[in-house]
Amino acid sequence: MQHESKRGGGGTRASGPRAIHRHGLKVVIHRLKGVVRVGSGPRAPSDVRMDEICTNNIHNSLTVVLAPVTRCRSYENLAQPHNSLYYQQRAPPGVLLIAEASAVSETATGYPGVPGLWSDDQVSTVWRSTLPMGSSSTSSFIFLDIGRVDSSQPLRLDPRYTKDGLSDGSRSLEDRCRRLATDVVAAVVDEVGAHRVGLRLSPFAGGDTDSTNAAEAHALHLVCSMDRLGVLCCHVVEPRTRANGDGDGKKPAIPHRLSPFREAFRGTFIVNGGYDREEGDRAVSQGYADLVSYGRLFLANPDLPERFRKKAELNRYDRSTFYTSDPVVGYTDYPFLGQETQVA
């Protein structure tokens, strides 16, 4: 049975001013406002509501979402024409795309060749030609993955930018990290509206299905906070190692560890991690998720929604080209149905 959202409307805006003292946050929000305004199409960008997009996808069985996949091909941190082509290839009508992580600061890139959001040129000039926004019935839509960082690196909080410092013992480091994330998202919601904001979490990053209950509880607490803020969607990744299989050639088993997050979040719930067409369809039909995002399968099959509909064979992805800088090979040269291809 299709899961029905427990939240009415497009979410609510956080009330009251947020006391955020992180350096540069106001600049980031300014850039985000620029991103919200870009785009073209029969409807003015300011009229496009992302909650309508997700609802349109669910009702029209377009449950395939492009996951944010770092590709390292935005030279000098500027989106290039080949970046635009890459997303256009994967943009059939009505499909939701989540673009690769875009850095909010030159010191927060994480990888070489990732797109940035810290200059006017990066936002106003380049992304305008890259984001395919328009009518929810005729165009695809894109979210930007803002400020994602390497989850294997610890988050260091500077006492100057925390409300009560780090040495008074009043709050654990984990609590402070959750509060920081919640406050940042709340500030963005105040500026651009909850219906334009989503959250992506990898609660099991760096671990397997035996990850500690504490880590899972921390992520669940954050999801509950996001639900109270009324953000549009929550995108959560399954435990990685089990989702990738055990190397025995058998079809990998999806851990299905995300039910608590699904129950805690009343908006659109998106899952990711090792899904194929059958598993994705099952997750949606059983109410485990509203939408399913695909990374490697979508990058190797630009027409993935059509292939899923026709139950067609899939192109093999070439892992050796995932993070190279070539603007074509392993990026925009994967064939569509009807073209010569090597299938998995």
Image (cartoon, rainbow, N blue to C red):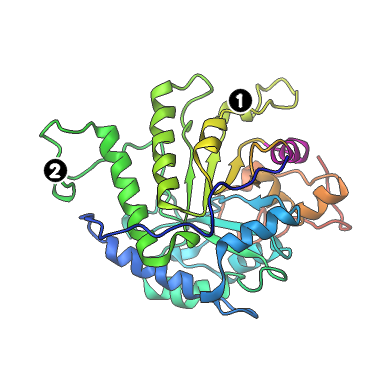
Q: Earlier in the sequence, mark 1 or mark 2?
A: 2
Along the viewing direction, whichever of 302 and 34 lies nearer the viewer: 34
Q: Is residue 279 magenta?
A: yes
The nearer-to-camera label among 1 and 2 is 2
Give the Cα separation between the discs numbered 1 and 2. 40 Å
Amino acid at dot 1: Arg
Quarter holding the N terminus is: top right
Task: Kindly tell me whether residue 181 is visible in this rendering.
Answer: yes
Asked if residue 128 is positioned above or below residue 241 in the image, the reply reads below
Residue at image position (30%, 40%) is 177
Label 2: element kind: loop
Q: Which residues are magenta?
A: 275-285
Residue at image position (38%, 24%) is 214
Along the viewing direction, whichever of 219 and 245 lies nearer the viewer: 219
The numbered dot on residue 164 is 2
Mark 1 crowdedness (10 Å alpha carbons): few <14, some 14-19, many ≥20: some
Position of residue 25 measured from the top left corner of the image (x, y, whole percent): 28, 60
Quarter holding the C terminus is: top right
Name the residue that disc number 1 marks.
242
Q: Quadrant of residue 328?
A: bottom right
Identify the main secondary structure in magenta.
helix
The numbered dot on residue 303 is none
